Image (tube, helix red, strand yellow):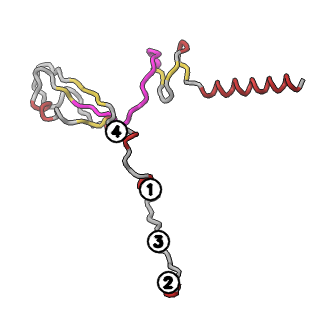
Amino acid sequence: MKIIIGVAVLLLAAFLFFRNNRSVAGSHGRTVRPGASLNPKSGRAQPAPRPYRATSIVPGTNACGAVAELQETRFLDAQGATPALPLEGCDAGSCQCRYAHHTDRRDSSDDRRLAGQLQSQLYEANSGDERRQRRRGRRRRDLN
């Protein structure tokens, strides 16, 4: 009897563990990456937000001078700085300019800071207080 109860408890624990650790299930049994959500209208997975994605403006066939000035400029999407098309002062009859989206260029594996530098930078970012003090020595003149 004790063996049956033990096996039942073990199976229940395994079931609860796997149920809580699987990916979020989408509609029709599809799985969605963690961090992503489902679009309520189409039922498709929406990509996880990327706060450091950039946008630039690609000029169309009859581009105006305002777009030519901003052609090489990248705007950070998180700041909402990307101007709306057509731009103010656009003199084209029908604006054919479009947005080009650029992924985040940062690579997390390319962090060149040493562990000690990273620790001090994180400490300064969180508290901001410089708490290092001059230590007293062990000599007689240092004790006074």
| Residue nearer the viewer, 116 or 126 | 116
Q: What residue did someone put label 1 on?
A: 116
- Residue 72 locus on image (x, y percent): 18, 34
Distance CA(mark 3)–CA(mark 4): 36 Å
Q: Is residue 63 left or right of residue 44?
A: left
Q: Secondary structure at mark 1?
A: helix
Q: What residue did someone put label 2 on?
A: 142
Question: What type of secondary structure mainly makes up the magenta span?
Answer: loop
Badge 4 local density, few (<14 within 10 Å), some, or many (20+)? Answer: few
What kind of residue is marked 3? Gln
Front tag of 4 and 1: 1
Q: Which mark is residue 133?
A: 3
What kind of residue is marked 2? Asp
Q: Quadrant of the N terminus?
A: top right
Do the CB atoms of the residues marked 4 and 1 lie less than 8 Å apart?
no
Do the CB atoms of the residues marked 3 and 2 lie less than 8 Å apart?
no
Q: Earlier in the sequence, mark 3 or mark 1?
A: 1
Distance CA(mark 4)–CA(mark 1): 21 Å
Residues in magenta?
Answer: 39-56
Front tag of 3 and 1: 1
